[in-house]
Image (cartoon, rainbow, N blue to C red):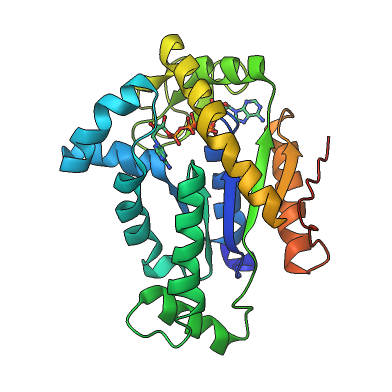
Protein backbone atom coordinates (compact mmCIF):
# COMPACT_ATOMS: atom_id res chain seq x y z
CA UNK A 1 0.00 0.00 0.00
CA UNK A 2 2.72 2.47 0.99
CA UNK A 3 4.59 1.88 -2.28
CA UNK A 4 1.49 2.40 -4.36
CA UNK A 5 0.72 5.75 -2.85
CA UNK A 6 4.17 6.90 -1.66
CA UNK A 7 4.42 10.60 -2.38
CA UNK A 8 5.25 13.89 -0.84
CA UNK A 9 2.81 14.96 1.83
CA UNK A 10 4.98 17.60 3.49
CA UNK A 11 4.63 18.26 7.18
CA UNK A 12 1.50 16.89 8.84
CA UNK A 13 0.88 17.70 12.49
CA UNK A 14 -1.68 15.70 14.42
CA UNK A 15 -2.84 17.88 17.27
CA UNK A 16 -5.11 16.69 20.02
CA UNK A 17 -5.35 15.88 23.71
CA UNK A 18 -4.06 12.66 25.25
CA UNK A 19 -6.17 9.80 23.93
CA UNK A 20 -7.46 11.69 20.89
CA UNK A 21 -6.04 9.00 18.59
CA UNK A 22 -2.87 10.70 17.31
CA UNK A 23 -0.80 7.52 17.51
CA UNK A 24 -3.60 5.39 16.06
CA UNK A 25 -4.18 7.69 13.10
CA UNK A 26 -0.52 8.40 12.42
CA UNK A 27 -0.07 4.66 11.81
CA UNK A 28 -2.75 4.85 9.12
CA UNK A 29 -1.02 7.79 7.42
CA UNK A 30 2.30 5.94 7.55
CA UNK A 31 0.75 2.87 5.96
CA UNK A 32 -0.90 4.81 3.15
CA UNK A 33 1.75 7.37 2.32
CA UNK A 34 4.95 5.61 3.36
CA UNK A 35 6.26 8.54 5.39
CA UNK A 36 7.57 8.25 8.94
CA UNK A 37 5.71 9.29 12.03
CA UNK A 38 7.61 11.09 14.73
CA UNK A 39 6.09 10.70 18.16
CA UNK A 40 7.91 12.80 20.72
CA UNK A 41 6.32 10.71 23.48
CA UNK A 42 7.85 7.57 21.95
CA UNK A 43 11.22 9.28 21.49
CA UNK A 44 11.20 10.31 25.15
CA UNK A 45 10.18 6.82 26.29
CA UNK A 46 13.09 5.38 24.27
CA UNK A 47 15.46 7.75 26.07
CA UNK A 48 14.02 6.68 29.41
CA UNK A 49 14.45 3.00 28.49
CA UNK A 50 18.08 3.65 27.47
CA UNK A 51 18.76 5.64 30.64
CA UNK A 52 20.17 8.65 28.78
CA UNK A 53 20.62 12.04 30.42
CA UNK A 54 17.49 13.28 28.63
CA UNK A 55 15.60 10.17 29.71
CA UNK A 56 16.58 10.71 33.35
CA UNK A 57 15.48 14.34 33.17
CA UNK A 58 12.17 13.48 31.48
CA UNK A 59 11.17 10.44 33.54
CA UNK A 60 9.77 12.16 36.63
CA UNK A 61 8.15 14.93 34.60
CA UNK A 62 6.30 12.45 32.38
CA UNK A 63 5.29 10.33 35.36
CA UNK A 64 3.57 13.41 36.79
CA UNK A 65 1.82 14.10 33.48
CA UNK A 66 3.58 17.43 32.95
CA UNK A 67 5.32 18.65 29.81
CA UNK A 68 9.05 18.22 29.37
CA UNK A 69 10.72 21.67 29.05
CA UNK A 70 10.84 23.03 25.50
CA UNK A 71 14.64 23.30 25.45
CA UNK A 72 14.97 19.55 26.03
CA UNK A 73 12.66 18.81 23.10
CA UNK A 74 14.33 20.79 20.34
CA UNK A 75 17.47 18.67 20.03
CA UNK A 76 15.68 15.33 19.68
CA UNK A 77 13.17 16.68 17.21
CA UNK A 78 15.82 18.40 15.06
CA UNK A 79 17.96 15.26 14.98
CA UNK A 80 15.02 13.12 13.90
CA UNK A 81 13.77 15.55 11.24
CA UNK A 82 17.21 15.62 9.61
CA UNK A 83 17.09 11.89 8.92
CA UNK A 84 16.78 10.92 5.27
CA UNK A 85 13.43 9.15 5.62
CA UNK A 86 11.73 12.51 6.30
CA UNK A 87 12.43 13.73 2.78
CA UNK A 88 8.89 13.26 1.39
CA UNK A 89 7.27 14.47 4.54
CA UNK A 90 6.48 13.23 8.00
CA UNK A 91 3.75 13.11 10.58
CA UNK A 92 4.35 14.79 13.91
CA UNK A 93 2.49 13.18 16.81
CA UNK A 94 2.81 15.13 20.06
CA UNK A 95 4.91 18.01 18.74
CA UNK A 96 4.55 20.98 18.91
CA UNK A 97 2.86 21.11 22.27
CA UNK A 98 3.49 24.71 23.27
CA UNK A 99 3.31 27.95 21.28
CA UNK A 100 7.09 28.26 21.70
CA UNK A 101 7.57 24.80 20.14
CA UNK A 102 5.34 25.81 17.24
CA UNK A 103 7.44 28.92 16.62
CA UNK A 104 10.62 26.86 16.84
CA UNK A 105 9.27 24.37 14.29
CA UNK A 106 8.36 27.11 11.82
CA UNK A 107 11.87 28.55 12.09
CA UNK A 108 13.45 25.10 11.76
CA UNK A 109 11.47 24.19 8.64
CA UNK A 110 12.10 27.56 7.05
CA UNK A 111 15.84 27.38 7.65
CA UNK A 112 16.53 23.73 6.99
CA UNK A 113 13.99 22.95 4.32
CA UNK A 114 13.00 26.04 2.42
CA UNK A 115 16.14 28.18 2.61
CA UNK A 116 18.42 25.24 2.01
CA UNK A 117 17.03 24.03 -1.30
CA UNK A 118 20.45 23.24 -2.68
CA UNK A 119 21.13 20.90 0.17
CA UNK A 120 24.07 22.84 1.59
CA UNK A 121 25.05 21.03 4.72
CA UNK A 122 21.73 19.54 5.70
CA UNK A 123 20.04 16.28 4.88
CA UNK A 124 16.68 18.01 4.90
CA UNK A 125 18.01 20.48 2.34
CA UNK A 126 19.41 17.68 0.23
CA UNK A 127 16.11 15.86 0.47
CA UNK A 128 14.36 18.98 -0.63
CA UNK A 129 16.62 19.35 -3.63
CA UNK A 130 15.96 15.72 -4.51
CA UNK A 131 12.23 16.38 -4.38
CA UNK A 132 12.66 19.35 -6.69
CA UNK A 133 14.45 17.07 -9.14
CA UNK A 134 11.69 14.49 -8.97
CA UNK A 135 9.06 17.05 -9.86
CA UNK A 136 7.31 16.75 -6.50
CA UNK A 137 6.17 19.95 -4.87
CA UNK A 138 8.85 21.25 -2.50
CA UNK A 139 6.46 23.51 -0.72
CA UNK A 140 3.66 21.15 0.16
CA UNK A 141 2.20 23.35 2.88
CA UNK A 142 2.23 22.33 6.50
CA UNK A 143 -1.15 21.18 7.68
CA UNK A 144 -2.33 20.79 11.26
CA UNK A 145 -5.15 18.33 11.80
CA UNK A 146 -6.81 18.85 15.13
CA UNK A 147 -8.60 15.81 16.54
CA UNK A 148 -11.66 16.85 18.54
CA UNK A 149 -12.88 14.33 21.10
CA UNK A 150 -15.30 14.58 24.01
CA UNK A 151 -13.65 14.61 27.48
CA UNK A 152 -15.41 11.48 28.80
CA UNK A 153 -14.46 9.58 25.65
CA UNK A 154 -10.83 10.58 26.21
CA UNK A 155 -10.93 9.18 29.73
CA UNK A 156 -12.36 5.91 28.49
CA UNK A 157 -9.77 5.64 25.72
CA UNK A 158 -6.85 6.30 28.06
CA UNK A 159 -7.93 4.03 30.89
CA UNK A 160 -8.72 1.27 28.38
CA UNK A 161 -5.51 1.53 26.35
CA UNK A 162 -3.19 -1.46 26.21
CA UNK A 163 -0.13 -1.74 24.00
CA UNK A 164 2.19 -4.44 22.80
CA UNK A 165 5.77 -3.91 24.05
CA UNK A 166 7.10 -5.92 21.10
CA UNK A 167 5.34 -4.57 17.99
CA UNK A 168 3.80 -1.40 19.43
CA UNK A 169 0.26 -2.27 18.32
CA UNK A 170 -2.41 -0.41 20.28
CA UNK A 171 -5.54 -1.98 21.74
CA UNK A 172 -8.39 -0.78 23.84
CA UNK A 173 -10.30 -3.01 26.19
CA UNK A 174 -13.50 -1.08 25.37
CA UNK A 175 -13.31 -0.41 21.65
CA UNK A 176 -10.58 -2.66 20.23
CA UNK A 177 -9.86 -5.61 22.52
CA UNK A 178 -7.32 -8.28 21.59
CA UNK A 179 -8.65 -11.67 20.53
CA UNK A 180 -7.17 -13.27 23.67
CA UNK A 181 -7.46 -11.18 26.81
CA UNK A 182 -4.17 -9.43 27.63
CA UNK A 183 -2.17 -10.83 24.69
CA UNK A 184 -1.11 -9.26 21.39
CA UNK A 185 -2.90 -10.69 18.35
CA UNK A 186 0.26 -10.40 16.25
CA UNK A 187 3.04 -11.84 18.41
CA UNK A 188 1.35 -13.07 21.61
CA UNK A 189 3.28 -10.66 23.86
CA UNK A 190 1.70 -9.70 27.17
CA UNK A 191 0.04 -6.33 26.71
CA UNK A 192 1.12 -3.48 28.97
CA UNK A 193 -0.48 -0.36 30.45
CA UNK A 194 1.48 2.87 29.99
CA UNK A 195 2.87 4.34 33.23
CA UNK A 196 1.08 7.63 32.67
CA UNK A 197 -2.30 6.02 31.97
CA UNK A 198 -3.15 5.98 35.69
CA UNK A 199 -6.20 8.06 36.51
CA UNK A 200 -4.43 10.67 38.66
CA UNK A 201 -1.80 11.24 35.94
CA UNK A 202 -4.39 11.30 33.15
CA UNK A 203 -6.13 14.27 34.75
CA UNK A 204 -2.85 16.20 34.93
CA UNK A 205 -2.06 15.36 31.28
CA UNK A 206 -5.46 16.62 30.18
CA UNK A 207 -4.99 19.76 32.30
CA UNK A 208 -1.54 20.33 30.74
CA UNK A 209 -3.15 20.09 27.31
CA UNK A 210 -5.72 22.72 28.27
CA UNK A 211 -3.10 25.02 29.78
CA UNK A 212 -0.40 24.78 27.14
CA UNK A 213 -1.33 22.91 23.99
CA UNK A 214 -4.61 24.63 23.18
CA UNK A 215 -2.47 27.69 22.47
CA UNK A 216 -0.86 25.72 19.65
CA UNK A 217 -4.27 25.38 17.99
CA UNK A 218 -4.71 29.16 18.28
CA UNK A 219 -1.25 29.68 16.78
CA UNK A 220 -2.02 27.62 13.67
CA UNK A 221 -5.60 28.85 13.43
CA UNK A 222 -4.28 32.40 13.14
CA UNK A 223 -2.06 31.20 10.27
CA UNK A 224 -4.97 29.49 8.49
CA UNK A 225 -3.31 26.09 8.72
CA UNK A 226 -5.66 24.40 11.18
CA UNK A 227 -8.22 21.84 10.09
CA UNK A 228 -10.33 20.47 12.91
CA UNK A 229 -12.11 17.17 12.48
CA UNK A 230 -14.54 15.21 14.56
CA UNK A 231 -12.40 12.39 16.00
CA UNK A 232 -15.18 11.22 18.29
CA UNK A 233 -16.06 8.64 15.66
CA UNK A 234 -14.98 5.05 15.00
CA UNK A 235 -11.30 4.83 14.00
CA UNK A 236 -11.93 4.04 10.34
CA UNK A 237 -14.22 7.04 9.95
CA UNK A 238 -11.62 9.34 11.47
CA UNK A 239 -9.04 7.94 9.05
CA UNK A 240 -11.32 8.70 6.10
CA UNK A 241 -11.63 12.32 7.23
CA UNK A 242 -7.86 12.67 7.61
CA UNK A 243 -7.14 11.18 4.18
CA UNK A 244 -9.70 13.55 2.68
CA UNK A 245 -7.88 16.53 4.18
CA UNK A 246 -4.50 15.29 2.93
CA UNK A 247 -5.74 14.47 -0.55
CA UNK A 248 -7.58 17.72 -1.07
CA UNK A 249 -4.58 19.64 0.19
CA UNK A 250 -2.37 17.82 -2.30
CA UNK A 251 -4.73 18.80 -5.09
CA UNK A 252 -4.66 22.34 -3.67
CA UNK A 253 -8.44 22.26 -3.69
CA UNK A 254 -8.58 22.77 0.00
CA UNK A 255 -6.78 25.91 1.04
CA UNK A 256 -8.01 27.03 4.46
CA UNK A 257 -8.48 30.76 4.65
CA UNK A 258 -6.69 32.63 7.39
CA UNK A 259 -8.13 31.70 10.76
CA UNK A 260 -10.64 29.29 9.33
CA UNK A 261 -11.37 26.12 11.23
CA UNK A 262 -13.11 23.52 9.15
CA UNK A 263 -15.13 21.34 11.47
CA UNK A 264 -16.48 18.24 9.78
CA UNK A 265 -18.81 17.26 12.61
P1 LIG B 1 2.57 11.26 24.29
O1 LIG B 1 3.15 9.92 24.22
O2 LIG B 1 2.62 12.15 23.11
O3 LIG B 1 1.09 11.08 24.80
P2 LIG B 1 -0.25 11.94 24.61
O4 LIG B 1 -0.16 13.18 23.81
O5 LIG B 1 -0.71 12.11 25.99
O6 LIG B 1 -1.11 11.09 23.71
P3 LIG B 1 -1.42 9.58 23.84
O7 LIG B 1 -0.31 8.79 23.25
O8 LIG B 1 -1.82 9.24 25.24
O9 LIG B 1 -2.75 9.48 22.98
P4 LIG B 1 -3.00 9.46 21.43
O10 LIG B 1 -3.68 10.71 21.03
O11 LIG B 1 -1.77 9.06 20.68
O12 LIG B 1 -4.07 8.30 21.38
P5 LIG B 1 -3.91 6.77 20.90
O13 LIG B 1 -3.87 6.71 19.44
O14 LIG B 1 -2.81 6.12 21.69
O15 LIG B 1 3.23 12.10 25.47
C1 LIG B 1 3.50 11.50 26.73
C2 LIG B 1 4.25 12.51 27.59
O16 LIG B 1 5.51 12.83 26.97
C3 LIG B 1 3.58 13.87 27.80
O17 LIG B 1 2.65 13.83 28.85
C4 LIG B 1 4.80 14.76 28.11
O18 LIG B 1 5.23 14.57 29.42
C5 LIG B 1 5.87 14.18 27.20
N1 LIG B 1 5.92 14.87 25.89
C6 LIG B 1 5.65 14.31 24.66
N2 LIG B 1 5.80 15.21 23.69
C7 LIG B 1 6.17 16.38 24.29
C8 LIG B 1 6.46 17.69 23.83
N3 LIG B 1 6.38 17.98 22.52
N4 LIG B 1 6.80 18.64 24.72
C9 LIG B 1 6.86 18.35 26.04
N5 LIG B 1 6.60 17.14 26.56
C10 LIG B 1 6.26 16.15 25.70
O19 LIG B 1 -5.32 6.19 21.38
C11 LIG B 1 -5.64 6.07 22.75
C12 LIG B 1 -6.56 4.85 22.93
O20 LIG B 1 -7.80 5.12 22.28
C13 LIG B 1 -6.03 3.56 22.32
O21 LIG B 1 -6.38 2.48 23.15
C14 LIG B 1 -6.76 3.45 20.97
O22 LIG B 1 -6.92 2.09 20.58
C15 LIG B 1 -8.09 4.13 21.28
N6 LIG B 1 -8.67 4.83 20.14
C16 LIG B 1 -8.00 5.61 19.23
N7 LIG B 1 -8.86 6.13 18.34
C17 LIG B 1 -10.10 5.67 18.70
C18 LIG B 1 -11.42 5.86 18.15
N8 LIG B 1 -11.64 6.62 17.06
N9 LIG B 1 -12.45 5.25 18.76
C19 LIG B 1 -12.25 4.48 19.85
N10 LIG B 1 -11.03 4.25 20.41
C20 LIG B 1 -9.97 4.85 19.85
The vertical placement of 81 against 26, above or below, is below
Relative side of 133 to 164, left or right = right
The vertical placement of 111 against 154, above or below, is below
Picture quarter with the C terminus: top right
Picture quarter with the N terminus: bottom right
Camera-side residue: 122 or 237?
A: 122
Relative side of 91 to 139, left or right = left
Q: Is residue 24 visible?
A: no
The vertical placement of 177 against 56, above or below, is above
* Location of residue 254 by image quarter: bottom right
Residue at figure coordinates x 75%, y 37% from the top left:
237
* Location of residue 175 by image quarter: top right
Residue 203 percent location from the top left of the image: 49, 15
Residue 227 percent location from the top left of the image: 73, 48
Residue at figure coordinates x 40%, y 44% from the top left:
40
Residue 10 percent location from the top left of the image: 58, 65
Q: How many marks?
A: 0
Amino acid sequence: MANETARNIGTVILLGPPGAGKGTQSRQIVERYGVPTISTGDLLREHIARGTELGLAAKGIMARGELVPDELMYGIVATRLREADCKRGFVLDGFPRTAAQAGWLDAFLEKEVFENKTGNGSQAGAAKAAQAGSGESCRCPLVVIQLLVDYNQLLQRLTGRRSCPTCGLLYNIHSQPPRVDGLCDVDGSKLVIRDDDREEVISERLAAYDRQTRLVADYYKAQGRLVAINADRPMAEVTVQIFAVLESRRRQEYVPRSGEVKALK
